[in-house]
């Protein structure tokens, strides 16, 4: 029987030095690349706190390092704006959306975003805001559940999550695209330093007297990364692994969240229907690709090592 690899005790130099050097290196590199942000200290504090708190929390943060690496890569995209590599698609995407999914309203043909902008309701503002708030917590909570109940499924889920994101990032750079709210505010003229915008989600903040979304979108890595909608990808991955783990009624909840996020993305003018469909396609492609890669000996061995390391 294989013995799980031993994790160095955090009370020894061998246990302390790697994480300390990694933490300092991350802060210094981040400062040079994207500047100092309080989020970086929060991340370092969280990682170090969990690593030194107990053996179980140390294994937990090591397992979740896959998600931490994703967060760092996403943050670093600010230093390499996709619009410096390829032209941003604004009018062409808007026109295609209207051609394929246009809704006749009076004498006009509107995109679904424009239709809902004209039919906004307070109840939908709140409901769609709640759905949109779940796009990160639900995958992370599900990942936590898998970590503590089915670690051999946790790592495939985490690696699929990262793979889907990497596919999305590649498309961001190959096909930079403006979101619907950009057209509503700026028309078809390209403005490279456009800040993030809450768009329809601002109504959620206003109705509840909070600044949840305004604080989130003030930190946007790139507003010209609407295609594909990774907001729409995440619940697909969650539902897929929920079905694999036979979670029963919980999968019904996941399905509702999935449909709610898809609708919210369009209702709040953050994504076109085309962006949502691209996000769904990206998720399905990542799932299929990972399942094929998982049949290879090297990936299976890598996953098994991760499972043993955090057992």
Image (spheres, helix red, strand yellow):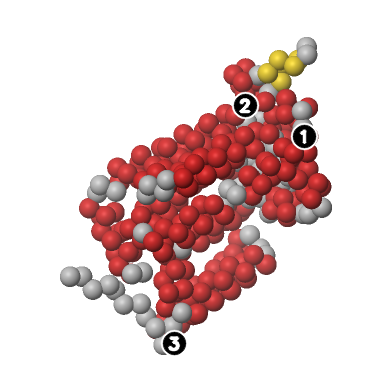
36 to 295, vertically: above or below: below
According to the picture, the residue beneath numbered tag 3 turns out to be 11
Residue 178 in view (yes/no): no
Picture residue at 50% right of the left edge, 80% below the top: 53
Q: Nearer the viewer, residue 81 or 59?
A: 59
187 left or right of 147 in image: right
Quick check: marks 2 and 3 in contact, CB under 8 Å?
no
Separation of marks 2 and 1 at Cα, in angstroms: 26 Å
Query: How far across and down, in percent of the image, does residue 269 sit?
Result: 69, 35
Query: How far across and down, in percent of the image, does residue 76 sit?
Result: 57, 56
Q: Earlier in the sequence, mark 1 or mark 3?
A: 3
Quick check: marks 2 and 1 in contact, CB under 8 Å?
no
Q: Earlier in the sequence, mark 2 or mark 1?
A: 2
According to the picture, the residue beneath numbered tag 1 turns out to be 121
210 left or right of 78 in image: right
Residue 146 occupies quadrant: bottom left
Mark 1 surroundings: few (<14), some (14-19) or many (≥20) residues within 10 A = few
According to the picture, the residue beneath numbered tag 2 turns out to be 93
Q: What count of labels does the image hold?
A: 3
Kind of element beneath mark 1: loop
Separation of marks 1 and 3 at Cα, in angstroms: 56 Å
Residue 261 in view (yes/no): yes
Q: Earlier in the sequence, mark 2 or mark 3?
A: 3
């Amino acid at each position: 029987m294989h013995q799980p690899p031993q994790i160095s005790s955090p009370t020894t130099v061998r246990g302390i030095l790697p994480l300390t050097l990694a933490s300092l290196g991350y802060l210094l590199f981040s400062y040079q690349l994207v500047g100092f942000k309080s989020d970086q200290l929060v991340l370092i504090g969280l990682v170090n706190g969990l690593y030194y708190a107990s053996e179980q929390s140390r294994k937990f943060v090591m397992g979740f390092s896959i998600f931490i690496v994703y967060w760092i890569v996403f943050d670093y995209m600010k230093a390499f704006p996709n619009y410096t590599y390829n032209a941003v698609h604004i009018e062409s995407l808007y026109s295609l959306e209207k051609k394929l999914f246009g809704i006749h309203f009076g004498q006009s043909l509107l995109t679904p975003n424009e239709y809902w902008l004209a039919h906004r309701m307070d109840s939908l503002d709140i409901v769609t805001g709640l759905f949109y708030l779940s796009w990160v917590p639900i995958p992370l909570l599900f990942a936590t559940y898998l970590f503590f109940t089915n670690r051999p499924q946790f790592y495939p889920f985490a690696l699929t999550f990262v793979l889907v994101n990497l596919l999305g990032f590649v498309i961001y750079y190959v096909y930079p695209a403006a979101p619907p709210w950009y057209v509503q505010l700026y028309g078809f003229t390209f403005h490279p330093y456009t800040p993030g915008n809450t768009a329809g989600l601002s109504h959620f903040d206003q109705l509840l007297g909070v600044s949840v979304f305004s604080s989130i979108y003030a930190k946007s890595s790139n507003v010209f990364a609407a295609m594909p909608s990774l907001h729409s990808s995440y619940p697909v991955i969650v539902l897929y692994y929920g079905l694999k783990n036979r979670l029963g009624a919980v999968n019904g909840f996941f399905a509702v969240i999935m449909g709610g996020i898809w609708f919210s993305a369009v209702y709040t003018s953050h994504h076109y229907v085309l962006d949502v469909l691209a996000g769904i396609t990206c998720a399905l492609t990542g799932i299929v690709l990972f399942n094929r890669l998982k049949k290879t000996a090297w990936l299976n061995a890598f996953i098994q090592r991760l499972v043993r390391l955090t057992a």
